[in-house]
Amino acid sequence: GSLRSVYVPMKEVDTTHALLSRVIESLELGFETRGRSVSEIEDWLFTRLKESFLVMVVDEADRNLNALTPVLHRFPRETGHASFLLISRNPRLLDALPSDTKDAFRPHRLMFPPYTDEELSTIITQRAKIALTNGSCPSEVCWRIADEAKLDGSARFAIDLLKNAAYIATQEN
């Protein structure tokens, strides 16, 4: 079998149907999900993935647990070859899942502490070098953004601050 992986940002998924559609689209399986039931889509997908090992990375997994839970429950049982990496800032995410779902995919917790201001500054500096005109974001601006974002240790928030600062700067010029 082959190793297949898919990234699912839950901020873009509001139902189990949409999640499964995203998986099929990401894996480029060419199956039309519109007008089909969740069980039809699952059956089709399970048949296609029988010989594959699937790794599903689910970002912001706590955004819509109702859409995610059926997938966490059925994929490991039906395929036998599915692993999930659930990314969440909520340390109690797994506690909210039904026990039979946890039994199906046997979760392990791996906790990462929030980023420090130094780590955030490094991330912002790297992103600024990639995305902005050379020298347009002085190191003191990167440190200020990192200092602001360190309150919750969120790299995503820090990157959004950089993006918004860059947008404002382009509007003023």
Image: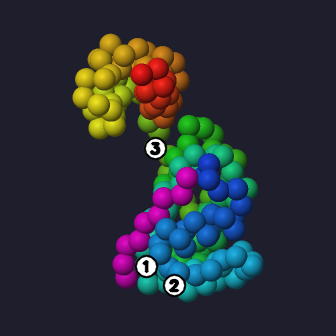
Residue at the image position 36 percent from the left and 28 percent from the top: 124
Report the mark closest to the observer, 1 or 2: 2
Tell me the quarter of the picture where residue 159 sits. Answer: top left
Seen in the picture, residue 31 relative to 20 is either above or below; the reply is: below
**Which amino acid type is marked by label 2?**
Arg
Looking at marks 1 and 3 on the same chain, the residue that comes earlier in the sequence is marked by 1
**Image location (x, y in percent) of residue 115:** 41, 27
Mark 1, residue position: 52
Q: Provide the major secondary structure of the magenta segment.
A: strand
Of marks 2 and 3, the one in the foreground: 2
Write down the region rendered in magenta. 1-9
Distance, label 1 to label 3, CA atoms, is 25 Å
Crowding around mark 3 (Cα neighbors within 10 Å: few <14, some 14 to 19, many 20+) is few
Q: Label 1 to label 2, Cα distance in Å?
A: 8 Å
Residue 38 drawn in magenta: no
Secondary element at image label 1: loop
Q: Residue 143, percent across and down?
A: 36, 16
Quick check: 7 above or below 20?
A: above
What is the number of the mark on residue 110?
3
Residue shown at the point (33%, 32%) measured from the top left: 132
Horizontal placement of 36 versus 165: left or right? Answer: right
Q: Magenta segment: does it hold 2?
A: yes
Taking depth in this image into account, of 110 and 166 the one nearest to the observer is 166
Q: Residue at x 66, y 46 (%)?
A: 63
Q: Is residue 24 left or right of residue 125?
A: right
Q: In this orientation, which residue lies closer to the viewer: 83 or 28?
A: 28
Q: Is residue 113 visible?
A: no
Answer with left or right where residue 81 lies relative to residue 63. Answer: left
